[in-house]
Image (spheres, rainbow, N blue to C red):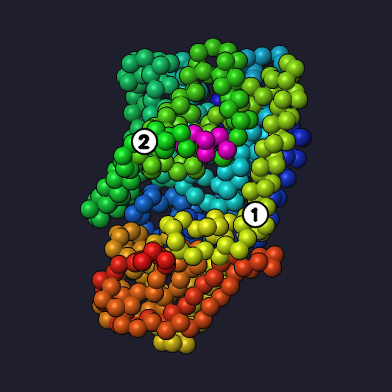
Amino acid sequence: MLPLRSALPQYRVSRNTWILLFLVCTLHFGMGALLGLSVDEAHYALYAVHLDWSYFDHPPLVGWAQWPLVALDASAWAMRLVPELVWLATALLAYRLAERLNASARPTGPTGRSGLWAVVALALAPLLHVLGIGLLPDTLLMFFSVALLGLTWDLMDAGAVRRPLPWVALGVVLGLAGLSKYTAILAAAAVALCLMLAHGVAVLRNVWLWMAVGIALLMVIPVAYWNERNHWISFVYQARHGAGGGWQVTHLARFLVVQALAYGPLLLWGWAGFRQAMGARPRVLSLFFVVPFVVLAALSGGGTSLPHWTAPAWAALAPFAGVGLAHAVQHGRRWVIWGLVAAQGLVCAAVLGLMLTGGVPVFTATTGQGNSAAPSNPFADVHGWDVAGSRARVLAQQHGLQSVGVQNWTLASRLGWYARPLPVYVLEDRFDQFDLWAGDLPAGGDTLLVDWSQLAYAVPIGANGFANCTLLETQDVRRLGTTIATFRFYACRNWSAQPLPRLRGAF
């Protein structure tokens, strides 16, 4: 029995669950139509523009999945249907697995409740809405992690382990996970540990296991091929990025607090679900949460782990959370659970509302001065870039400029997307994907320099910049009558090719 097959009668999705899924998907669709692309979304959309075997910082599937829509010149709202469908598929898989867990613990108990609560836990995790609106590698890996959990549970059965079809499915899903993100290796480790605990070393003599491994390795050949041709730069980058700086317990503590806020206590009810699952096999599946979460938590001590990196682990916890929450509601903790539902619902509403308003009214009179490395209003990030990109194309044409320049790589992706087909040069001494796409601005070159007030840089003139830069235009981004950011466009000529970007106010 494969978790990727449509729901069988005993796991048919309940009416209340369909209503909840419809409401969440409508919310995602509406938000996706109203918001511009975030920095990461635009970066991965550019993968589809520059179709390749792999890329500097991630494997290629996030770009490949968007290529058909990009080739059709689809609008941003249409492209966001992809993450919405992936989120929906993840929720449906979590529903089915929660119902399987419930059946294993209480064969004659009520159906539908555990699955519904698994979907509720996913729907009320604030950060998972971001992955349902915008396509990131973690959006894909979230789905594949839940699918791998179900497949592994199947293969922990003595009968299924002797059949080739479950192993073929496992190999394919492992391969797709590997094409999504490098941290898929953590999900693969969870698969290996679960199978070893279920069957012992005897599983290593199973020919179908090695067929699955072969399928997975064959599918990720594009990543190895691209890296071999590019001096293995992805692996060098990931190794350095994962190592981070000096390990500090304060970084770990901050990581844990952020995780609790980003995903909420409902998913943590998965630990109660582990206790209620009958038999050792379902409980062993907790490794799909434990392995990636522990590794990423350890990396956070070096300051390198981002909140959304753990999303696949939390999604794998959702089926168990569904069992635990349903059991708690049934046994007298109804008001506690509904209180948490209300609290997380308010947090989700607040975060999504601030995204729509650009941070207004919480963040006001803060257009950003560039005095720190972080924007003063994080919600300004998804507003105004489409208009700025369109204006950049017009100004570049009017002033005979053939490219756009920025002084920080995080500013490049949205202009690279919205100012297409103009190439974007990153004017800092840092190697990244844009160096592979556009290279360096040549010495003596001219460009349209774009500055964003939320991460503003001093205009680079002199030995570490251009011979001269002329301010062409200033463009304010306004939400609810409040200016939340400002773009400045400069015609800059005769580049020195000796970059030394300085944040505005940091000199």
Q: Amino acid at mark 1?
A: Val
Q: Main secondary structure of the magenta part?
A: helix
* Mark 2: few/some/many CA within 10 Å (<14, 14-19, 20+): few
Rendering quarter of residue 430: bottom left
Rendered location of residue 393, percent (x, y): 49, 78
Residue 256 magenta: yes
Label 1: which secondary element: loop
Identify which residue is drawn at 53% across, 78% down. Answer: 474
Report whether 334 appears left or right of 365: right
Query: In the image, which residues are magenta?
Result: 255-261
Identify which residue is drawn at 33% across, 46% down. Answer: 241
* Mark 1: few/some/many CA within 10 Å (<14, 14-19, 20+): few
Identify which residue is drawn at 57% across, 62% down. Answer: 366
Return the disc, 1 or 2, that comes first in the chain's sequence: 2
Identify which residue is drawn at 47% across, 77% down. Answer: 489
Total labels: the figure holds 2
Rendered location of residue 441, percent (x, y): 31, 73
Quadrant in which the N terminus appears: top right
In terms of depth relative to the viewer, which is nearer, 218 or 410?
Answer: 410
Residue 240 magenta: no
* Residue to which mark 1 is pinned: 362
Q: Is residue 454 above or below residue 281?
A: below
* Residue to which mark 2 is pinned: 248
Quadrant in which the C terminus appears: bottom left
Q: Is residue 131 above or below residue 318?
A: below
Q: Is residue 446 above or below residue 287?
A: below
In terms of depth relative to the viewer, which is nearer, 431 or 201?
Answer: 431
